[in-house]
Image: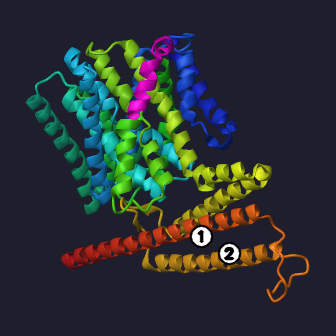
Amino acid sequence: MTVDLVSLAIIALIAAASPIVAKIVPNKLVPETVFLLIAGALLGPNVLGLIEVTDAVALLSDLGLGFLFLLAGYEINPKSLTGGQGKRGLVTWIASIALAFGVVIAAGLMKTNELEAMAVAIALTTTALGTLMPIMKERGLMGTRVGESILAYGTWGELCPVLAMALLLSTRAEWQTALILLAFVAIAVIAAVVPAKAKKAGHRLFRFLSENADGTSQTMMRMVVLLLVGLVAVSAVFDLDIVLGAFAAGFVLRYIIPEGDRSLEHKLEGTAYGFLIPVFFAVSGAKIDLSAVFAQPALLVGFIVLLLIIRAAPIFVALSTAKGTRDISTHNRLTVALYCTTALPIIVAVTSVAVGADAMLQETASVLVAAGAITVFLMPLLGMLTYRVADAKPIEAVREIAHNPRDIGDILREHWELERMLAREEELERRLRKGAGCDHPDAEGGVGGSSWQDRAALLQRRGARRRAIDEALDLAAQEMARHDLAVDADPDGDGPRHAVGSPSLDERRRRIARLVAHEHRRRLIERGRLIEQALLVQRDEDARDGEKTDERD
């Protein structure tokens, strides 16, 4: 008991210090999850030995993993599975798993150890959507087109590996595994349908749970914990990985309360991110054998490179070729692909199953988990660079500096201002959408959840802002023209004109103006498409509501 409490106290200290350390790093370059993993690895049994992964600590870690996947499943909009991007996400994952099996077959793993080969193949196709959620919220990606694409492709990157684990890593016969999965799905469906029916019918029990949700009983929170622990226990009894039960619990909860419940969500996030999820990441770090990682650097780097080839490349190709997303800028498509290559929780689960079945060495598992931990730091970092820094057109800046090295300060300042202007425009767009109640885009980029009046007001504000931006650009162009005239020139354009600016400086300003105009035009077109889809979604919802009203009458 003492060892358990000491280990838990050290983990709590790590959890409390990690967000503070992450805040010190400029521009949120390193997510706090990375510090949890690093601290766990350094203080774990393989280095300093201050944290012991006892049965009690391991149980809390498993509960943290369960809450992580519960929240991931709850955040997923079912339309992201059935919409256009969702279908492409499924096809992309199938392409990824085919590439992964091609790699393990070419490496000869299927001949030496089939179970290990399948575990590695599954690990190469994962997306840590649950890990990405808090990172995306911190960086303001939720509700943006890039964020919706990450959700659409990342959903299948987390759901399909969970199902693949149940089917491919089981020691039972395939038909037995299929029957067990069907039984589990039936239980999950019952757990979803019965409460949803009771809620719709206004049953006394559901009213009681709702009325006492915020009191000392915390009835709704207790029911969610029952749902999570119950489905995780069922998956354990069926000899399935607990990740499947936790993910199913998230889907069930979203089915019961499709409109969401902010009070319940705050409580879940407080319990999960405040206590259990940090325990999971710290314990995951404590399981990493750093000596084994340093002994096999080629495997570490090779696994990360394979993740980029097998997971990121197909997503980038899918985004570039699909009709609905190929108009997204190249660096934003790359951003989506990089974020979707973040992988850790599934790698931890897959390697645990393989090690437990004596199909994989613990040293190899440590290297794969370490590679997954590196992706949690590396991929969001690269994604942030491509998402934000690319707006400043760094390649254009390098070319200009090469031609005019003396003007390096002005060049960097101009490009940085370009990035800041586009960032402010996007932030304003997000606030306008949130203010109009349009902060729940569907999988195809449409927006739902607000009234027709709100959307009309939003359109008016966007139109006014667009006109204001156009007027500002015209005024800026006139001011630039006046700045470039000689002292004796007429500011109205009627007198003599003698340019005083150097040709290189003039050319740079024109190029920056063209870049701003091009990016602004692209974003306007994108917003128009979003609004059109939102209106179509709302029209369909109104039609369905009208049909339901007629049926009740």
Residue 37 x/y as whole percent = 52, 26
Q: Which residue is mark 2?
A: 473
Q: Which residue is mark 1?
A: 517
How crowded pointer 1 is (Cα within 10 Å; few <14, some 14-19, many 20+) is rated as some
- Residue farthest toward the bottom in the current orientation of the protein: 494
- Residue farthest toward the right in the current orientation of the protein: 488
Type of amino acid at the residue the image marks with label 2:
Leu
Q: Which residues are magenta?
A: 289-307
The answer to which of marks 1 and 2 sits earlier in the sequence is: 2
Residue located at (36% from left, 49% from top) = 317
Residues 341 and 450: in front is: 341
Query: Which of the image's four quarters has the C terminus?
Result: bottom left
Residues 71 and 146: in front is: 146
Residue 501 x/y as whole percent = 81, 67
Placement of 278 over or under 87, stated as above or below: above
Placement of 152 over or under 166, stated as above or below: below
Quarter residue 109 falls in: top left
Contact between labelled residues 2 and 1, with CB atoms less than 8 Å apart: yes
Dominant SS of magenta comes to helix
Residue 301 x/y as whole percent = 46, 25
Placement of 434 over or under 99, stated as above or below: below
- Determine if the magenta segment contains residue 368: no
Residue located at (61% from left, 50% from top) = 395
Judged from the image, the secondary structure of the residue bearing numbered disc 2 is: helix
How crowded pointer 2 is (Cα within 10 Å; few <14, some 14-19, many 20+) is rated as some
Judged from the image, the secondary structure of the residue bearing numbered disc 1 is: helix
